[in-house]
Image (cartoon, helix red, strand yellow):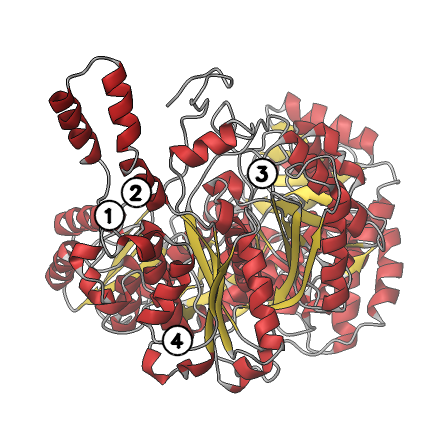
Amino acid sequence: YYDPDPSAPDKTYCKRGAFISPVDFDPMEFGLPPNAVPSTDTTQILALMVAQQLLDDVSQGSLASLDRERISVILGVTSGQQLLNSLVSRIQRPIWIKALRENGIPEDEAKKICDDIARNYVSWDEASFPGLLGNVVAGRIANRFDLHGTNTITDAACASSIAAVSMGINELQLGQSDLVISGGVDMMNDIFMYMCFSKTPALSPSGDCRPFSDSADGTLLGEGIGMLALKRLDDAERDGDRIYAVIRGVGTSSDGRSTSVYAPLPEGQLRAIRRAYEMAGYGPETVELVEAHGTGTKVGDAAEFEALRQAFSERRTDAQWCALGSVKSQIGHTKAAAGAAGLFKAIMALHHKVLPPTIKIQRPNPALDLAKSPFYLSTQPRPWIRDGSHPRRASVSSFGFGGSNFHVTIEEYVPKDGKAAAAWRLQTSPVQLVLLSAPTAADLISRCRALVETKDELVRVARESQEQFNATDLSRLAVVAESSAELGNKLEQAMAMITKSPDAGFVTPAGISYESGPPNPGKIGFLFPGQGSQYVGMGADLALSVDAVRAVWDEASISFDGESVDRVVFPPPAFTDEERAAQARKLTATEWAQVAMGVQSAALLKVLSAVSVKPDCVAGHSFGEVTALYAAGAFDLKTLARIARRRGELMRDASSIPGAMTAVMGPIETVRRVLEETDSSVIIANHNAPAQCVLSGPTEAIEQIEKDLSVRSVSSKRLPVATAFHSSLVSASVVPFSAYLEEVDFVGSNVDVYGTADAGIYPQDPQAIRERLAAQIAQPVRFVDQIEAMYERGVRTFVEVGAGNVLTELVGAILGDRDHRRISLDRKATNGLTTLLTALGRLSVAGVSLDLSSLWTEYKPSSPKKSKKPAMVMQ
């Protein structure tokens, strides 16, 4: 049927599409006689299977407990099904015979040819009529599961799903139903449907669906089934149901008279949008995610964008605060199921608190003028951070031929009493941590061998291994893996290394950690980095996967100058190098960098606390001292953010004072001699390692010192900073910072906090804490002395809690071959969660007892009937 010429008769110019993979089906399980399967449309069969999954989730595995008297089935389905084409084709025999006769084919031969053609089509029988009807998609579900409410379908073309949802909500509001199975079903990806879209024409000649992209050239056909269980909120809470999201408003409209029955009309769409928010009781200015219809056609995208732009600009004038995307970029246009797909995506985004991506956009469509609109294109997954002023809100648009317009606005479910049942979640952690222990190395190898041969799900293997792990066993192994295959390969590597040297511990960069002998972690010290380690997107992977991390960003979502720190750390996706550079510069600005670093460290602290990893003492490098005090309990998170912001502002203001800093690689004694012999106005601002320090002072003096060091073959490198920090040149910041701290409530620390100025421990008196913290801005950072003091008091495990791994490397340079462990919980260009879990595994095998239960939640197993118990997954 393919021809690249769009005008070729009876041909399609598109030869790609999105198709559901083959699905195993046991007809007897669904009460369908096997001989009736050929006469039953695939749509009806697959819809039965999806409905069963839905009802199993609704009933929490106890379908018999549902009151089926007032359960309705209302689905969006196109009226004709794929089977119809086969049955209609079969009865075209008179046309075939006529053509054969007219071409001189003998009667007997013509009959045989027609018989051969007919065998390619499904035969008519008593099951054919119900098997081809669209309404029987809903009817078969009601029949199989004995549901006695309304049973019907609606056809609003590509808006059918949301039309069905709207009808279902009406049923609930009128009290005619207590539970409605709704959504959309569409398996019509046959040549008939391709011909329909080809001759419109609406299909992509290049074979891709790229909504809102500058290369958008049409849509791509897909197929799928999406169902939702709708219930009145009060009833769902009363019944203890798992609630994924709350629909607040549905707006519907018709274009009325227009130039064409299939051309999109912004005015008609705008009516539906406004009506949805009238019903919701709030405005679109509070919505932060729009799942667009987004067909990828230039005309359709432009019309939809214009309607959304008008509605979302009515009460808010700032730009690019709402994410815009379309699931069609990933699964194609599923027609009658398209609205269900968009709604499912938006619901999952709210439920997981993630701003999901739209793919295939290298550059936005310039005709949309996004920069001056409320919207930005969401092209990468980002944590959805909210300040708590209202729940997260999203909306979904869906439109169909004939001028049918629908808009749905939904919000995340926030339990009233905090005791509602947790809804199933998808597995979002990219990796799993497997912990194994045994009395001897030989026993551990046997456990590894048994695990290699298991065929169980990785998530279940990880969960059970953590439950069985004994940190006091003499042989302990931790492995981080993305898949069962990767776990098997890493276990093979581990077994080989353990067999070769059973008494020698090791850690590999790939995430394998082994220790042998009695655990001896020593004391644990947390280290907090200072400004300079920050980068755009730091901590995003953890905030996407771990609720405890995202909750910290939520709590710290405080507005400074009209913008929140999370917006600076997790900015909207950039499309040019210039945009990316601008985002990096903004985060590098002192007033933003310090508060961002503080919140990122606080987020990692929450994870460590959740798994019961606690420090014996804490310390920070430069600004990190502020975070260290927070970690020790001196003040709360919001206070941390405000102190960091004010400190950053004052250091920004101090940047107007001429000054410079240079990093020196050489023995500290040599540097000190050079300073004594030359200019005393230059000081050692940072003593970071035995052979590394940073000098700070007036610009001219720094230039001279660099020349003097060069003469002695000592290298130096000018740092890209605004002035001479940690020197007397910024002492003017001390007084206003001290005055600001007078307004802050401090309490004594619950663990020792080592200061950077003298490597001594912070006092407990609040006033003394204020004075010391204020003075620290203009004092040198004695990091070497700090680490040595901690080591002297028994710290053997140093954990860098924050962005980057600069301090981890410095600790290694300071302590050298002395017994110690150093761990970074975040590495740029490395999956942060992998690093975190590897680190936790290292701590576990070092003898620290971990409690991972607080990071786990129930999730829907891929094969629920085969599961021995509810599977779990790290969020």
Q: Quadrant of residue 724?
A: top right
Q: Earlier in the sequence, mark 1 or mark 4?
A: 1
Question: 10 Å neighbourhood of mark 1: few (<14), some, or many (≥20)?
Answer: some
Left or right: where does residue 569 sit relative to residue 455? right
Q: What residue is drawn where x is 59% and y is 59%?
A: 601
State if disc 1 and disc 2 touch (CB < 8 Å).
yes
Left or right: where does residue 34 sit relative to residue 799? left
Mark 1 to mark 3: distance in Å?
A: 37 Å
Which mark is on residue 147? 4
Q: Earlier in the sequence, mark 2 or mark 3?
A: 2
Amino acid type indicated by mark 4: Leu
Q: Quadrant of the N terminus?
A: top left
State if disc 4 and disc 1 touch (CB < 8 Å).
no
In the rendered view, tell whether residue 579 sits above or below residue 397: above
Task: Tell me residue 105's x, y (percent).
Answer: 18, 16
Residue depth check, mark 1 versus mark 4: number of the one nearer the observer = 1
Mark 4 to mark 3: distance in Å?
A: 35 Å
* SS for dot 4: loop
Q: Earlier in the sequence, mark 4 or mark 3?
A: 4
Which mark is on residue 87? 2
Mark 1 to mark 4: distance in Å?
A: 29 Å
